[in-house]
Image (cartoon, rainbow, N blue to C red):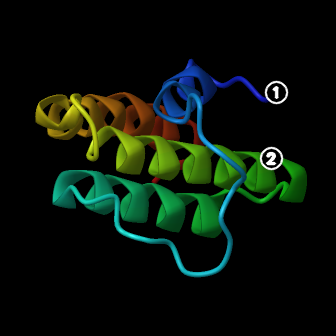
């Protein structure tokens, strides 16, 4: 697994116990804060990560995070989802800004 400044761990934390990775059009997580974060992160990955293997790994982790956040909005963790996404955005985008200039 690719590890850059804990981003993989952060993304995978949200994706625990999730099924296969979805494809094509991403579905809403059910939380606008999460959707905004994931959209910005995906745009950064697609625009700035040049290495195809690394880009694919980031996109797989992004989809795991999306599925994890979606799952969180449908259970007892719903009150915590916006905060988790805000924290993930702060951590992830700071690293992406430093490493990729997003």
- Do the numbered discs 1 and 2 sit on residues whose CB atoms are within 8 Å? no
Q: Callout 2: 10 Å neighbours few (<14), some, many (20+)?
A: some
In the picture of the structure, the residue carrying the numbered disc 2 is: 54
- Pick out the residue farthest to the front: 75
Q: Gap between marks 1 and 2, in whole Å?
A: 10 Å
Element type at marker 2? helix
Q: Position of residue 67 (x, y in %)?
A: 50, 50
Q: Callout 1: 10 Å neighbours few (<14), some, many (20+)?
A: few
Element type at marker 1? loop
The mark tally for this picture is 2
Label 1 or label 2, whichever lies nearer to me, is 1
Give me the residue at 43% from left, 35% from top: 92
Q: Position of residue 2 (x, y in %)?
A: 78, 29
In the picture of the structure, the residue carrying the numbered disc 1 is: 1
Q: Is residue 23 above or below residue 29?
A: below
Give me the residue at 59% from left, 31% from top: 17
Q: Position of residue 8 (x, y in %)?
A: 62, 28
């Amino acid at each position: 697994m690719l590890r850059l400044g804990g981003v993989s761990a952060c993304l995978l934390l949200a994706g625990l116990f999730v099924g296969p990775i979805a494809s094509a059009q991403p579905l809403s997580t059910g939380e606008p804060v999460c959707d905004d974060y994931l959209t910005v992160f995906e745009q950064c990955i697609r625009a700035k990560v040049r290495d195809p293997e690394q880009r694919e790994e980031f996109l797989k982790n992004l989809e795991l995070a999306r599925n994890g956040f979606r799952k969180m909005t449908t259970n007892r963790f719903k009150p915590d989802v916006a905060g988790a996404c805000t924290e993930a955005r702060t951590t992830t985008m700071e690293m992406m800004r430093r490493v990729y200039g997003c």
